[in-house]
Amino acid sequence: MPTTMGRRERKKAQTRQALADAALRLFLQHGYDKVTVAQIAEEADVALATVFKHVPDGKEALIFDDGAERRDALVAAVRDRAAGQTVLAALRQYLSTRGPFATDMPADLRPRRDLIMRTPALGNYQRKLWLSAEGALAEAIADAVGRDAADPAVRALARYVLEVPDLAGRDPNPRAALDTIFDLLEAGWPNP
């Protein structure tokens, strides 16, 4: 049975959304580096202490979730893949719908994506969020292939996949870079 969010939780979520909306608006108007946390607080009409209470990781965290949705979606891509589909094919398919790889991203999400891709601090924070999913992804891969999550090959594969968004996303042709990297992962490194 679904639980309803209490008044306090709703208020927190509304404040968090107001901060995220204000931050994105200001970042898009003035550039990430020219916006202060105090300006974001003023724009959202909250106290500066409230900003730090909701986002202790700093202003980078204002336009990202906590990474849980990303982690859960990666695990689901592995666990819920189609019969006969390889783990790597499922992960390639999932990543191809995200950020710089998406070809059908709604127009209203493109400015946010572009801001993240052109702002080093945001790109680095996003990379941190991707890498935070390593343990969960390694467990999902291990379960799928019948190996231990501590197996260095499983851990390496999880790490490599989680590095793809940062590495390929900064390429002039992100989708081609994504495919090149996954082709390499699927084939293994050729012996010259």
Image (cartoon, rainbow, N blue to C red):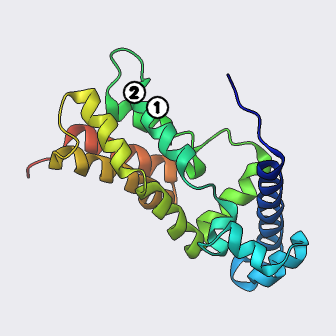
Q: Secondary structure at mark 2?
A: helix
Q: Quadrant of residue 14?
A: bottom right
For the point 37% across and 14% down, the residue is 83
Residue situated in front as seen by the camera: 28 or 77: 77
Q: Position of residue 124 (x, y in %)?
A: 50, 70
Asked if residue 61 can be seen in this view, the reply is yes
**Amino acid type, residue under disc 2 in the picture:** Arg
Could you tell whether 191 is left or right of 146 in the image?
Answer: left
In the rendered image, residue 47, in percent from the top left (x then y), is placed at: 84, 78
Contact, CB < 8 Å: mark 2 with mark 1? yes
User: Foreground residue, 156 or 39?
Assistant: 39
Q: Where is residue 105? Give x, y as percent.
A: 69, 42
**Residue 86 horizontal/vertical position (percent):** 32, 26
User: Is 168 left or right of 141, judged from the image as shown?
Assistant: right
Circle 1 Cα neighbour tier, 10 Å, few/some/many (<14 / 14–19 / ≥20): some
Q: Residue at x 16, y 50 (%)?
A: 152
For mark 2, what is the residue?
Answer: 79
Disc 1 marks which amino acid? Ala
Residue found farthest to the left:
192
Q: What is the secondary structure assignment of the residue under circle 1?
A: helix
Instruction: Compute the Cα span from label 2 to label 1.
Output: 5 Å
Name the mark on residue 53: none
Reply above or below: 9 against 62: above
* Position above or below: 67 against 63: above
Name the residue located 34 percent from the left edge and 35 percent from the top edge: 140
Is residue 189 visible in the rendered image? The answer is no
Report crowding for label 2: few under 14, some 14 to 19, many 20 or more residues within 10 A (C-alpha): some
| Disc 1 target residue | 76
* In the displayed structure image, the side of residue 175 where residue 58 appears, left or right: right
Which quarter of the figure has residue 183?
A: top left
